[in-house]
Image (tube, rainbow, N blue to C red):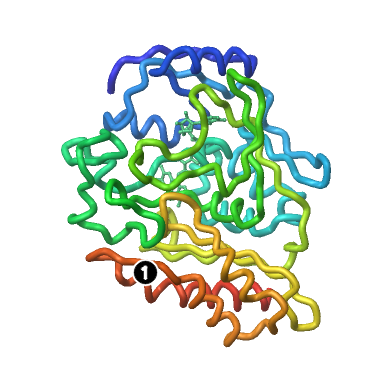
Amino acid sequence: MNQFQYVRATKPQAAIEAVAKDPNARFIAGGTNLVDLMKRGVMTPQKLVDINRLDLRKIERQNNALRIGALALNSTVADDRQVRERHPLLALALNAGASPQLRNMATVGGNMLQRTRCPYFYDTALPCNKRQPGSGCGALEGINRMHAIFGFSDKCIAVHPSDMSVALVALDATVQVSGPKGNRSIPFADFHRLPGDTPEKDTNLEPGELITAVDIPDGPFTKHVHYQKVRERASYAFALLSVAAALDIDNGTIKAARLAMGGVAHKPWRLTAAEQALIGKPATEAIFRQAATVAMQGAKAFKHNEYKLRLGPNIIVQALKTAAAA
Ligand SMILES: Cc1cc2nc3c(=O)[nH]c(=O)nc-3n(C[C@H](O)[C@H](O)[C@H](O)COP(=O)(O)OP(=O)(O)OC[C@H]3O[C@@H](n4cnc5c(N)ncnc54)[C@H](O)[C@@H]3O)c2cc1C
């Protein structure tokens, strides 16, 4: 592991200044992703700015939304009464991720900014445009079982690994950030980005910007929700593919719907066309199947991940059926 400087910030502005003025500085929260990447030489920051003493852990109601502080732990959020009552989809997605020990360390901000689990990104002996721009994408012609079927480019076919983020994009969350130029709000759907020609950039955050909170607006998705995750073992594994489904059903008719997928793109993948295909229709398997067909339009597989094209629609139907029955 490279040597690095470690500082503890007690005020957001000090943390922001420390990272904004030094391109080799990074914030550290739970450290469950960043420290792993540093041990493997994938990321080599020269300064870590510890943000754990900032007052960013609260979960509270504000302006018809639930505001979740960026340093709230994944386990605290999943167990929070307001989250479970108002946004049970988020609790389900969080509990599908990692292990209890990791969820006790991992924070909301860190979870959103965790890096891809593409093996070419993790192995510093192999090419990866995300780790080392211009070195090529090993996965394009290599082992690409885990990789994207939507939104990829010829520079990168990696997927975003966060379960929590799939629920947050479905719930129309907003990310609150503070930076050297002040505060701003970013709709969750615009927070992560597609790889294009610059896959080294995972998000639209500017240098030095600190995530302070995530806001989830009140909504009707308090009952008919489900997070379906397919992985290679029953726990402690990243999603091969996942679906967040939320329905508002009145007398058997779908009044509102939210759908998003994980494990399929460089960002959590919202399925708005499929949502539209559900609204006003009866909550039946045949309708769910039609929406799944709409959802998969434009999906393209690589040599080893063709199974995602078959698995995707089946998991969407299963998630919607389970949500409708909840
Ligand atoms: C074995 C293992 C299995 C896992 N399985 C899953 C899984 O199944 N599903 C899943 O979703 N996740 C999984 N994870 C990932 C885990 O959820 C993340 O490691 C964790 O959420 C990262 O949070 P953290 O607070 O530890 O982030 P850190 O490691 O501290 O930081 C991660 C990144 O975020 C930046 N950062 C942190 N906080 C902020 C902030 N407030 N503002 C700006 N930048 C910030 C840091 O600079 C760093 O670049 C797994 C991890 C491990 C090790």
Asked where in the image residue 125 lies, by quadrant, the reply is top left
Q: Residue at x 28, y 19 (%)?
A: 2
Any part of residue 98 in sight: no
Quadrant the C terminus occupies: bottom right
> In the displayed structure, would residue 48 be above or below residue 129?
above
Viewer-closest of 94 and 66: 66
> In the displayed structure, would residue 101 be above or below residue 221?
above
Q: Position of residue 69 (x, y in %)?
A: 67, 35
- Identity, as a three-letter code, of the amino acid under mark 1: Lys
Asked where in the image residue 33 lies, by quadrant, the reply is top left
Q: Position of residue 113 (x, y in %)?
A: 48, 38
Q: Residue at x 26, y 33 (%)?
A: 132
Q: Is residue 233 left or right of residue 212?
A: left
Secondary structure under the numbered disc 1 in the rendered image = helix
Residue under label 1: 308
Any part of residue 167 in sight: yes
